[in-house]
Each structure stands twice: as structure tokens, then as C-alpha cells.
Image: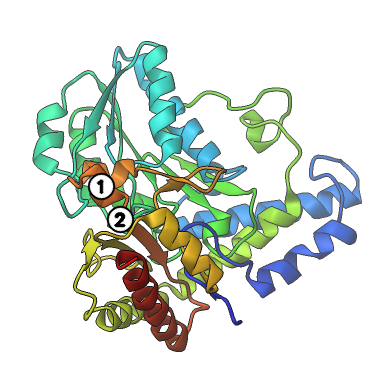
Amino acid sequence: MERIYFDHAATTPLDKEAFEKAAPYYTEFFGNADSPHSFGRKAQAAVDQARDKIAELLGAKPSEIYFTSGGTESDNWALTGCAEAKRKEGKNKVLISAIEHHAVLETAQKLAQNGFEIGYIPVNEQGRVEISALLEMMDEHVAVVAVMAANNETGVVQPCKEIAKIAHSWGALYFMDAVQLAPYARINVKEIEADAVAISAHKCYGPKGVGALYIKEKVKVGKLIVGGEQERGMRGGTTAVPQVVAFACAYEKCVQEAEETAKKMATYKKLFLQELAELEFASVNGDVETSPTGVVNLKLSGVENAAFLYSMDLQGVAISAGSACASASVKPSHVLLAMGLSEAEVKNSVRFSFGKGNTEEEIVRGAKIVKETARKIKNA
């Protein structure tokens, strides 16, 4: 059985060229990047080149780019750092969208325990932030506004530039989790006017365990990890040179291919939904048409998603739904609940996320399996 992978929003396969570029830094140029000898200097040069490249791709300065362990760490550091930086000015409110990744949601909860007031910006039924609600929530006490670029469950893209301007008009900072948008679109931090931006390598066909955080030069965040002088003394810990090298290579290819990839995703989503048009109990959650991502969140009325996921996997198709725990049961998605779906509707929803390695044949074959499986479960 030839398996089909429709879960690229969870992780992507490592790009072969990125793997090949990283390999020598495991075996030949294996020095610690902080060592003063030739082995260390070779490793540090590779890290510097990677930082320069990622900065260039994001429209930032190399001094504004910090390497982290991934999106979750970047989110934690960015939101906490921005909030604490503004607390010095007497600002004690943090506004985040109701559909943020758990890395942002739980960081906000931690900030609440440390004296910050947290506000949740609502979204409409299409999954887009309600700008009118944000305007009503803004005041001189807001320290930071955090709204993700594209949602990991629906793929819906937010009006980030507009949100940044609103935040700045009140003297607040704007943090953008761009983990899900980075594989599909060129991101320029200066054009968006973001103060902090997080991206993750493994969503961009890079390795797991490495990410990057852009922090605008004027924003003075605190240290994340002490005990080492890595990342200009802001994040201690031996630099993962091979991962950083692979990250820069993979991300550069994503940016170079962004327009082509977005067109391919549009084709795949259209073809997928055309194939499912006859499935009368299927409907899409969120605005699929305007998003460059490969995500389709599908509601299959009367089809319990845990059983559907299990059955699809047995037939060789990998998909996901909401936030799955280790036991493979599915927790109700806070994203879909925020969009107005009932808990029953959320439990009937699943996520398909296509990648550049998929083919039209896989899209059609996968859709056929979806139809057969959904009908079988619904009529059981």
C-alpha cells in the first residue's frame, strides 16, 4: 500500500539538499561554534552564514535573528520578552487572538500569573480576527498584541500589517507567530512592521529542533537561557550547527519557491474539494480560498473524527484533527470553538494539510478514500 501524507501542518519531510548541506557538520566540521580553534571557527562561520541568510530572507538585520529550538520556544520568548519590556513603561495588558497556538496561549496564562491582564481577541466564523473588537480592546495599558500570521488548524491568514499599525498607535508591540505561513509566503518583517516574528525549520522542510526568532533591535527583551554566551549572551546552550545550516538552506528554498508553492496549494485544495463536492455532509471550516497554505479543515457531519482518523490511517492516509493527546483521542479544538462551531461540530472536523511533495494523483486518490471512509462511518 502506497501511503499518502496529508499532515504537513504538523511537520514536513527534510529537504534532501538541506540534509546534504548539514551532513559535513556532523562528521567533518563538527567543532563547537564557540571554540577558538579552526574547528570551532569553521562551525561558527557556517552559523554566521545561516543567520545572514535568514535575516536577508526576512528583511531583517543579522543582529535581530536568534536561533532557538523551534516555534514553541520562540513563541515563549517573544511574548514574555515583549510583555516584560513594556511592563517597564507601566503597561500590563497582553492581547492575543483566541486562535493562537498553545505555545502562545499557555505563555499568556503564565504571564497572567505574573501580574499581566490577558485579553482574547475574538474571530469571526471564517477564522479571521475581528478588527473592530481589537480596536475596542486597545488602550494605553496594552503592552503587546499577539496575532499569528496563519492558523495551524484552518490555514486562515490574518491582516497582520493592519494589526501591527493598531498596536503601534497605542504604543504597544506586535508579535507575529509566522510558523505556518513561512513555508508558503515571503515574509518581510519591516513591511509588516512586526516587533517580533517566530518561524520553525521543520514546517519549512528543515530539521526538527531548530527555529528562529526575529526581535526588532529597539525591543530590549530579557535573556531566555543563562549559563552560556551563545546567541549574543541571550540564549545559552551549544549551537546546533548542522540543524542551523539545514534550516537556512530549506527556508531559502521555501522563499524562492513561495509563489509556485502557493499556486500548487491552490490547485490541490480546489481539486480536493471538487472531488468531495458530492459528499453532501461535508463542509469547510474557515476561509480556504484566500489562504496560500495547504490546509483544508473539513467538517464531516455525523462522522466522529477520532474514528475517522484511525480508519484513514489504516488505509494509508495520514491526517489530523485539533490537538491530539498521546492516547490518540482528540481534544476539542479551541480554534474551531472560537469560530462558533459547537463541540459536536468540532468533534466532526478533521484537518488535511498538503505539501509540495504531494501529487494531483494523491489528492484525487486521497479524496476518494475520504468519501468512502466518511460514508462507511456515518452509515455504521
Residue at 33 percent of width and 51 percent of height: 149
**Label 1 neighbourhood size at 10 Å, few (<14), some (14-19), many (20+)?**
some
Residue 216 point in image, percent of width and height: 43, 39
- The residue under the point 50% across, 59% down is 56
Q: Is residue 282 visible?
A: yes
Q: Locate the N terminus and report the quarter of the image it occupies.
A: bottom right
| Figure coloring | rainbow
8 versus 279 height, above or below: above
Is 351 above or below relative to 74? below
Q: Is residue 310 left or right of residue 351?
A: right
Q: Is residue 316 left or right of residue 246?
A: left
Question: Looking at the figure, which quarter contains the C terminus?
Answer: bottom left
Say above or below: 356 vs 320: below
Q: Nearer the viewer, residue 46 or 331?
A: 331
Tell me if mark 2 has few (under 14), some (14-19) or many (20+) residues whose alpha carbon lies within 10 angstroms of its own: many
Point out residue 194 in the picture as x, y percentages from the top left corner.
34, 44
Q: Are marks 1 and 2 in contact (CB under 8 Å)?
A: yes
Confirm whether residue 84 shows in the render: no
Question: The residue under label 1 is which amino acid type?
Answer: Ala
Q: What residue appears at the point 86 percent right and 40 percent down from the top-left corner?
A: 35
Mark 1 to mark 2 CA distance (whole Å): 7 Å
Q: Position of 369 compared to 92: left or right?
A: right
Q: State the mark number for residue 344.
A: 1
Give percent across and percent down for residue 370.
Answer: 38, 74
* Residue nearest the observer in this picture, 14 or 242: 14
Name the residue that disc number 2 marks. 348
User: Looking at the picture, which amino acid does disc 2 mark?
Assistant: Asn
Q: In terms of secondary structure, where does tag 2 sit?
A: loop
| Residue 240's disc number | none
Spot occupied by residue 375 in the image (x, y as percentages of width and height): 32, 72
